[in-house]
Amino acid sequence: MLYIVPTPIGNLEDMTFRAINVLKAAEVILAEDTRKTKNLLEHYEITYDELIAYHKFNEHKQLQKFVELAQAKNVALVTDAGTPGISDPGFLLIRECLKEGIQVLTLPGATAFVPALVNSGLPCDKFYFEGFLPHKKGRQKRLNYLKELDQTIVLYESPYRIVKTLEQLSEFFGQGRKASVSREISKIYEETIRGNLIELIEHFKNKPPKGEFVIIIEGANT
């Protein structure tokens, strides 16, 4: 069995009772950063037999090893924050386990884009999750594609590129397109700024951006 276990994106109280019980029962825990996961396990007084690093730098090379672990034992996969597989490692292992007939069970839990989307005030009955845009190759192609969508669009971004990304969105989508930027979701300095793209650019030029960001953009013709 492979359990996919969401972990808090900020406030440690966002951990579910079920997630805690699954981690307590797991024979092996695969973690994106074992140091961060140790802190979480200690906070909830969860003891473990094996804690193994599973991240984007080793998931290809050691994929077969991880699959064999899931064939023999109950394995729980966690990332640093949020739900594994959503802009985090996990997809490859899940796919290979399913190919091998290994049962995969994903627990509901924390992920950054859902509260940001709902809190934006923009339509959330239909939305398109893009995640992180390509840094270089293919970036303009993606922006040209996204600008025509009539669903609300969800992007992730780092503090180092948030202003540049908002400027590019303004260039491709138009300055007046409505948007919302949420940062530090579920943490003490959680904040959501709403307005059109040019207003958001001015805000973050005047206020140095900190934390991880979720950008929500209204769809075309809405």
Image: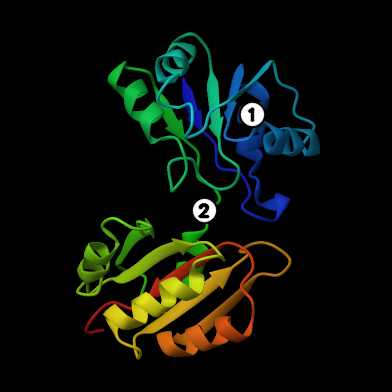
Foreground of the two, 172 or 148: 172
Q: For residue 167, which quarter of the picture?
A: bottom left
Foreground of the two, 13 or 172: 172
Q: Is residue 73 left or right of residue 132?
A: right
Image position, residue 92 (x, y; %):
37, 30
Image position, residue 146 (x, y; %):
25, 69
Crowding near pointer 1: few (<14 within 10 Å), some, many (20+)? many
The answer to which of marks 2 and 1 sits earlier in the sequence is 1
Label 2 SS: loop
Q: Which residue is mark 1?
A: 23
* Separation (CA) of disc 2 from disc 1: 18 Å
Crowding near pointer 2: few (<14 within 10 Å), some, many (20+)? some
Question: How is colour applied across the structure in the image?
Answer: rainbow
Residue type, numbered disc 2: Thr
Q: Which residue is mark 2?
A: 111
Total marks shown come to 2
Outermost residue, front direction?
Answer: 136
Image position, residue 49 (x, y; %):
69, 15
Q: Are marks 2 and 1 in contact (CB under 8 Å)?
A: no
Residue type, numbered disc 1: Leu
Label 1 SS: helix
Q: For residue 91, which quarter of the picture?
A: top left
Outermost residue, top direction?
Answer: 72
Is there any visible trace of residue 170 in the rendered image?
yes
Which-is-in-front pick, marks 2 and 1? 2
Vertical side of 208 occupied by 50: above or below: above
Vertical side of 180 occupied by 63: above or below: above
Image position, residue 18 (x, y; %):
61, 37
Image quadrant occupied by the C terminus: bottom left
Q: Residue at x 44, y 11 (%)?
A: 68
Q: Residue at x 53, y 17 (%)?
A: 74
Q: Residue at x 33, y 23 (%)?
A: 96
